[in-house]
Image (cartoon, helix red, strand yellow):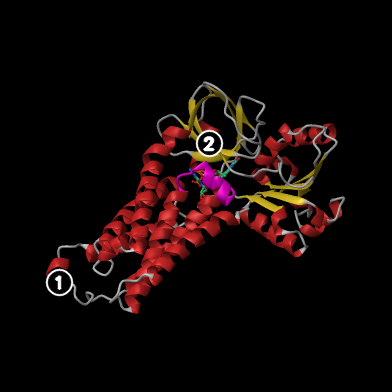
């Protein structure tokens, strides 16, 4: 669940900037210039925050409720910034402010930098938002967004109407943001991956009916994580390219890491068909805040398909004297799709506080609120809900649970996508 703290922080930063910009606007700036440069400034701050959110810094995970939420805010900030950049472009006066020397201003490349940034931004956003482009082709153009950011810094630092605002509070605010944004970008590009990697060897590859389980043994030391967290997996061999995020399905007590991977595209198919035992893997993380330990004692864990993985780790870590009463509702198309079903059944016999409800859609059993009402022992609003599965399923059930009177703070979900 997206935590409000991070969003409030973003709104507060924008409010401070706008307060400075409108409250201490330079004399002689007409209202249109002040208004449109404010829009440009907000766009720039949102871009800065979008870049900062891509650094995967752990403290920010606490503010926003997990890395998946940070990426969602990263996307919304970036898209909003793009729209505001367009509004700034069409709104800002094209003639030079009164008193500006055209010959001096001709030396400053603000306008061409702005135009170039705008064109690049529109192209990059069109690529970024196109979900049909496979991730490995999408990644590089998305990273080129950094170039847009540098061009925009050049644009506002040399813009005639805000030129002397470098010495104004709102201008200084933007320069401070630019420093943070540039440092964040450099860290995301060159520093982040050096700090977060742990080396592993592929110990086993288990071909399950509908997924592949890979077992990784650490080269040195333990990899600490909490049940429900995920990590980026990077195979160290030619042709494997980018890291991919997967939830750890083993419990933290085990030193080996297990990932259970469903074929969804090229990379995951390669995992099933080409990965070999003994290869090297770098695991980066752990990330995520899909933590059920701090919630109430009555919990429903709702998994759709491959969304079972965070719950596998949680259940494998669960003790018989755990004070929580957990009902796992596992929605699958047919029973053959239910991963580790025999193990889950045996856990439900072993753990007195755990009940398994498997719903098969081919038998007309859907993970719907009306069906859950008949299967859960207690009133529906008395449980905390943890949901993981296909986005439409999770969103639909969350909406219905809200309608059925479940409080917002009792709903927790994990999105298996960042884009
Ligand atoms: C937090 C999280 C946890 C996940 N846990 C699991 C799990 O336990 N088991 C499992 O089977 N799947 C999991 N996934 C999904 C898994 O990451 C994708 O299915 C996989 O990366 C698809 O790669 P592909 O090239 O085979 O498919 P593609 O067709 O290239 O990608 C399918 C979709 O996966 C996403 N994706 C692809 N590559 C990446 C990447 N490098 N980084 C981020 N997103 C990417 C994109 O949204 C893309 O649209 C998880 C995803 C996230 C975000």
Front position in the image: 151 or 363: 151
Of badges 1 and 2, nearer the viewer stands 1
What is the count of numbered marks? 2
Q: Secondary structure at mark 2?
A: strand
Q: Quadrant location of ligand 1?
A: top right
Q: Which residues are magenta?
A: 54-66
Residue 119 found in image quarter: bottom left
Q: Tell me, for residue 324, which label it has, or none.
A: none
| Residue at the spot of label 1 | 102
Q: Residues within 10 Å of mark 2 (few under 14, many from 20)?
A: many
Front position in the image: 253 or 154: 154
Q: Is residue 284 magenta?
A: no
The percent coordinates of residue 324 (x first, y second) are 80, 41
Left or right, 82 with reference to 297: left
Residue 343 found in image quarter: top right
The percent coordinates of residue 41 (x first, y second) are 37, 64
Q: Is the residue 21 above or below the residue 2 in the image?
A: below
| Residue at the spot of label 2 | 285
- Can residue 263 be seen at all in this image of the molecule? yes
Left or right, 175 with reference to 315: left
């Amino acid at each position: 669940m997206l935590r409000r703290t991070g969003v409030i922080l973003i709104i507060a930063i924008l409010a401070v900037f706008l307060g400075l910009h409108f409250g201490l606007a330079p004399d002689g700036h007409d209202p249109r210039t002040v208004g449109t440069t404010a829009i440009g400034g907000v766009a720039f701050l949102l871009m800065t925050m979008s870049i900062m959110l891509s650094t995967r810094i752990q403290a920010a995970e606490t503010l926003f409720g997990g890395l998946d939420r940070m990426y969602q805010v990263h996307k919304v900030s970036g898209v909003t910034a793009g729209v505001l950049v367009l509004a700034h472009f069409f709104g800002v006066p094209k003639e030079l402010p009164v008193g500006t020397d055209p010959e001096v201003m001709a030396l400053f490349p603000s306008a061409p930098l702005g135009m170039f940034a705008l064109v690049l931004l529109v192209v990059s956003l069109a690529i970024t938002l196109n979900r049909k482009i496979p991730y490995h082709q999408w990644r590089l153009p998305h990273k080129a967004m950094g170039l847009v950011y540098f061009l925009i810094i050049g644009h506002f630092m040399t813009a005639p109407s805000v030129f002397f605002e470098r010495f104004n509070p709102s201008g200084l605010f933007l320069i401070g943001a630019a420093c943070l944004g540039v440092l964040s970008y450099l860290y995301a590009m060159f520093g982040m991956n050096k700090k977060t990697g742990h080396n592993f060897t592929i110990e086993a590859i288990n071909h399950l009916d509908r997924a592949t389980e890979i077992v990784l043994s650490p080269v040195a030391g333990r990899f600490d994580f909490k049940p429900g967290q995920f990590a980026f997996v990077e195979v160290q061999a030619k042709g494997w390219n980018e890291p991919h995020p997967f939830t750890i399905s083993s419990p933290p007590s085990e030193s080996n890491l297990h990932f259970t991977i469903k074929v969804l595209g090229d990379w995951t198919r390669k995992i099933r068909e080409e990965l070999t035992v003994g290869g090297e893997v770098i695991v980066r993380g752990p990330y995520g805040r899909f933590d059920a330990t701090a919630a109430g004692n009555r919990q429903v864990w709702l998994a759709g398909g491959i969304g079972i993985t965070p719950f596998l780790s949680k259940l494998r870590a669960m003790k018989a004297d755990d004070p929580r009463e957990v009902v796992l509702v596992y929605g699958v198309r047919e029973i053959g799709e239910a991963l580790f079903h025999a193990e889950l059944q045996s856990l439900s016999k072993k753990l007195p506080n755990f009940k398994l409800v498997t719903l098969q859609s081919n038998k007309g059993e859907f993970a719907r609120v009306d069906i859950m009402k008949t299967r859960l022992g207690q009133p529906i609003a008395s449980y905390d809900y943890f949901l993981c599965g296909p986005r439409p399923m999770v969103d639909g059930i969350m909406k219905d649970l809200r309608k059925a009177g479940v409080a917002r703070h009792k709903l927790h979900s994990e999105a298996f996508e960042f884009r």
